[in-house]
Image (spheres, helix red, strand yellow):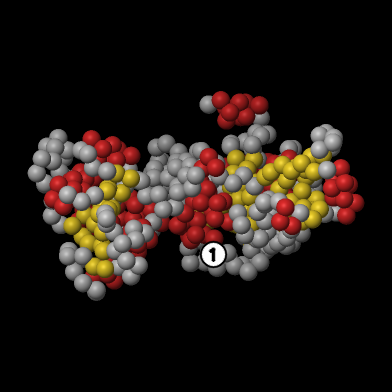
Amino acid sequence: MTKTYVMDTNVLLHNPEALFTFEDNEVVVPLAVIEEIDNQKKRQDEVGRNARIVSQMLDNLRSSGSLAEGVSMPGGGVVRIEVNHLNGPDFPKALEPQKHDNRILAVAYALGLKTGQPVVLVTKDLNLRIKADVLGVPAEDFCNDKIAYHQLYNGTGELRVGRDEMDAFFQNGKLGVNGSLQAHPNQLFVLRSHTNPSQSAVARYARGNLWPLVRGDTVQWGVKALNKEQKFAVELLSNDDIKVVTLVGRAGTGKTLLALAVGLEKVLEQRAYARLLITRPVTPMGDDLGYLPGSKEEKLRPWMQPIHDNLEYLFKDCADRHDVLDDLIQRNTIEMEALTYIRGRSIPRQFIVCDEAQNLSPHMIKSLITRVGEGTKIVFTGDPEQIDHPYLDASSNGLSYLVEKMKGEEIAGHVTLVKGERSKVAELGARLL
């Protein structure tokens, strides 16, 4: 039996392709959604871009028929714009009809009464789902790009081996496992001896073999890994053959500091990359400060302050560290950029660090990663349990999505950092609060 799915605006602004993900069912876009999309189309950010894409998609469908009557989509199903049922019978008078959310809910409610067929409201708005439940309207989040966060790939594992295998690993510099080990490319393992549990080694899986870590204990711009997960992270960050690295962990686990330290080492000492490019989403925690005066750099400074703090720490041995940093930024050896301005660029031979990536949608992650040019390495860091975006959660954010989608690729690596190293206070707060 086919279903009717009524779309909320936030779903289409989150992912314009959502229109085409409901197979052979009917997709209804209330007229209130079109009005909301029209109100967002002039924004110069990801939301504005998605609003314009949705408008273009609907306009293209319009050439194939009447959107009011329904237009068949290329992959199956029908999409139509619903102009009726804005004030359906028995709709609670307490819900203000001027509000767009209530108008969208009224469409779903009235369609269910009229057709007698399953009608589902698809929205990322928690309160709208609650109101729909009160009225007996089935409501769902858009789950097409959701990941089971509590089962998220952590990039590590433990393997018990015999004494002969452990000896072979140290003597030969590798241990062949072929199909005997279910592992992903660049997954990191702790090897423990069956006969002597205190005997252990750390290794990276690649091309059917376990290889010893060769970079995990190295000092990167004065920073040395303090635990095994940080060693794993340094191994992935320092390997130029691994082009996409994702680091997930709580506050204080060293994600951003390690990424910046390796980036500085690669750019300034090894000259492996032409520039260190740092970006992060402009998503406030709590109340937004609103308009900020000044140049682009001055507007960006408050959002990039955590990056400046980390860079100042990494240059702590320089007596004139502020001047050195300013000089590197002036010469574009270190560049800090808002994600808004990265769209459309092609970025070759650079070391890119995208911090706070948990505040990006999967679509935004795709937009950023497709900017990567030849010879560029990109690192994503973040904590999916600390999300400031109103319509993302631990399962639907772009960082979790990227980790899960990239885990089988030879040029990608991931590690989840678990131990806080910032301070005892920070670790206690992250663990207990």
Could you tell me which residue is drawn at 81 percent across and 38 percent down?
A: 194
Q: Hey, which quadrant is residue 198 in on the image?
A: top right
Could you tell me which residue is drawn at 70 percent across and 61 percent down?
A: 241
Label 1 crowd bin: few (<14), some (14–19), many (20+), radius 10 Å: some
Q: Quadrant of the N terminus?
A: bottom left
Residue 421 percent across, percent down from the top left: 68, 34
Check the image and name the residue furthest to the right.
Answer: 171
Q: Is residue 2 left or right of residue 84?
A: right
Instruction: State whether residue 341 is above or below residue 157.
Output: below
Check the image and name the residue furthest to the left.
Answer: 89
Q: Which residue is at the front of the view, 148 or 297?
A: 148
Residue 302 percent across, percent down from the top left: 50, 44
For numbered disc 1, what is the local secondary structure? loop
Q: Hey, which quadrant is residue 84 in on the image?
A: bottom left
Q: Which residue is at the front of the view, 284 or 122?
A: 122
Residue 389 percent across, percent down from the top left: 42, 44
Q: Is residue 394 left or right of residue 141?
A: right
Check the image and name the residue furthest to the bottom.
Answer: 63
Could you tell me which residue is drawn at 54 percent across and 64 percent down?
A: 371
Q: Note whether residue 280 is visible.
A: no
Q: Is residue 45 left or right of residue 258?
A: left
Residue 330 percent across, percent down from the top left: 62, 57
Could you tell me which residue is drawn at 67 percent across and 52 percent down?
A: 183
Instruction: State whether residue 70 is above or below residue 266.
Output: below
Q: Which residue is mark 1?
A: 371
Q: Is residue 205 left or right of residue 114?
A: right
Numbered marks: total:
1
Q: Amino acid at mark 1?
A: Arg
Q: Note whether residue 22 is visible.
A: yes
